[in-house]
Amino acid sequence: MDTRVRFAPSPTGYVHIGSLRTALYDFLYAKGKQGKYILRIEDTDRSRFVEGALENLIKSLEWAGVKHDEGVFLENGKIVQKGNYGPYIQSERLNLYKEYINKLLDKGLAYRCFCSKERLDKVREEQKKRGETPMYDKHCRGLSQEEIQKKLDEGKDYVIRLKIPEDEDVKFKDLIRGDIAINSKEIDDQVLIKSDGFPTYHFAVVVDDHLMKISHVIRGEEWLTSTPKQVILYNYFGWEVPEFVHLPTVLNKDKKKLSKRQGDVSVSDFKDKGYLPEALVNYLALVGWSPKGNNEIFSMEELINEFSFENVSKTGGVFDVEKLNWVNSQYIKNYDDEKLYKLIKPFVVKEELLNEEEYLNKKDWLIKIIDLVKEKISYLEEIDSHIQMFMGKEVNADDEVKEVLSNDGVRDLIHAFIKNLEAIEEVDEEFTKNIFKKLQKETGAKGKNLYMPLRGAVTGQLHGPDMGKTFIILGKENIIDRLNYTLKNYTK
């Protein structure tokens, strides 16, 4: 059987990091097996539908480089569907679900349930009081055809439930967890069709996966308890059961499920802060999966070649932002300066450090800054503070810097530096190579008593990128202006 996998999200809002990891594992497995990766949209729960969520979903996946072969696409702002197994949007497949539910009804493998919400709530409460697991009590399972017809004639609302077999072990294999067996006594008579005529997830997913020839069902472990119901449906229809893969949950550092309450959890959150898609995907692959060697930096091609479910953990993977920052910093450090110049533009313009025209006119200057500071940043939003350091004629020093600048000898050091600057035409590599030795000879200052006051006097910081390159980017006039500002405001 050809390898065909699907990512089947609901358009209910932002794309969660955990969802992106599921899509990524789908993609990696399919590509590693020369198979197909499909994007299907499960939108039958109309109460949770969010306008624009589908477009956001597709854009987020495309940005991350997790590109599907068939399914739902966005072209020129419009939703289109491509492939031989469509429609790929569940709400457009209602006639198919109707056809297959009727087959189950005709065989007596599903039944109509007319129980009101009030009755169901009461039954569950009584079961809880007795310490039982709340389940449907099969009240409507034994209704005669006449009783059913009478209720239909009276216009009573109903759902359609799956008739679970009595006392039978339901078995299936999970590629991460191995062989699993659950007795049917523990399985509820699941609702397959809701009172509004829309299918539930449990029914639609089986029909869709079978008709789309899905070979491997890859999804979060929260669906593990639902799998026996779906296996029963496969058996009732006489269909081949696919391989199942239930992925461990993505956890926060407290080992709890990653939640919006604890901070950034959507793909957009990380994109908006300037994380590189390659880095986010690289790190996410490692949240629950362990490669064979010690390498932690992988291209997409390398991930495809190395990935397997054999090395995916049964327990939740911890999403550590600090580790993500490290991975992202490795990518930024090795990124092409021209590409970074294009990528940082939204951050610089948004913070009004430069307008659009200034940004274009100062390209060479910005690329010099990027080349100098890219080793110091974890995500692109941090570039703003580094660019700010090179702007303006004033020096903004904190208490720690002020203390260094107020030490004896600092004024003499700064005056000596200004005198050397006034004697040259421009600050170049030769000047920066010799100036520190020259100032040491002229003032007697050395080590941190030389470097820290000079850096603080020019940049307002005690630590930072290469000082010589920093001086070249700032230029002679700017440095002199800043040194005079420091003499006036921060030295004794």
Image: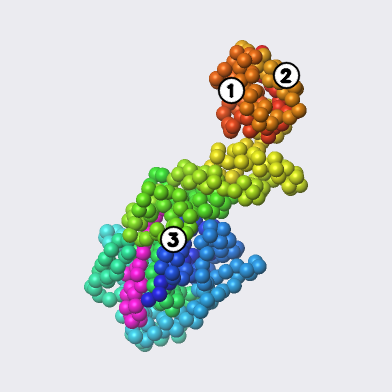
Look at 56% across and 74% down and name the residue there: 81
Q: Tell which tag, 3 or 2, sits nearer the viewer.
A: 2
**Earlier sequence position, callout 3 versus callout 1:** 3
Graded by Cα atoms within 10 Å as few (under 14), some (14 to 19) or many (20 or more), the crowding at tag 1 reads some
Residue 432 locus on image (x, y percent): 65, 27
Q: Nearer the viewer, residue 94 or 122?
A: 94
Establish if 19 lies above or below 468: below
Q: CA distance from mark 3 to mark 1?
A: 48 Å
Q: Is residue 425 left or right of residue 282?
A: right
Establish if 328 lies above or below 447: below
Look at 64% across and 49% down and name the residue there: 338
Q: Nearer the viewer, residue 229 or 417?
A: 417
Do callouts 2 and 1 mark residues in contact (Cβ within 8 Å)?
A: no
Q: CA distance from mark 3 to mark 2?
A: 60 Å
Instruction: Identify the residue under disc 2.
Output: 419
Graded by Cα atoms within 10 Å as few (under 14), some (14 to 19) or many (20 or more), the crowding at tag 3 reads some
Q: Amino acid at mark 3?
A: Ile
Q: Is residue 132 left or right of residue 59?
A: left
Residue extent of the magenta highlight: 227-251
Quadrant showing the C terminus: top right
Residue 201 locus on image (x, y percent): 43, 70
Q: How many marks?
A: 3
Instruction: Identify the residue under disc 1.
Output: 452
Residue 354 locus on image (x, y percent): 72, 42
Q: Is residue 235 magenta?
A: yes
**Earlier sequence position, callout 2 versus callout 1:** 2
| Residue 304 marker | 3
Look at 73% across and 47% down and name the residue there: 360
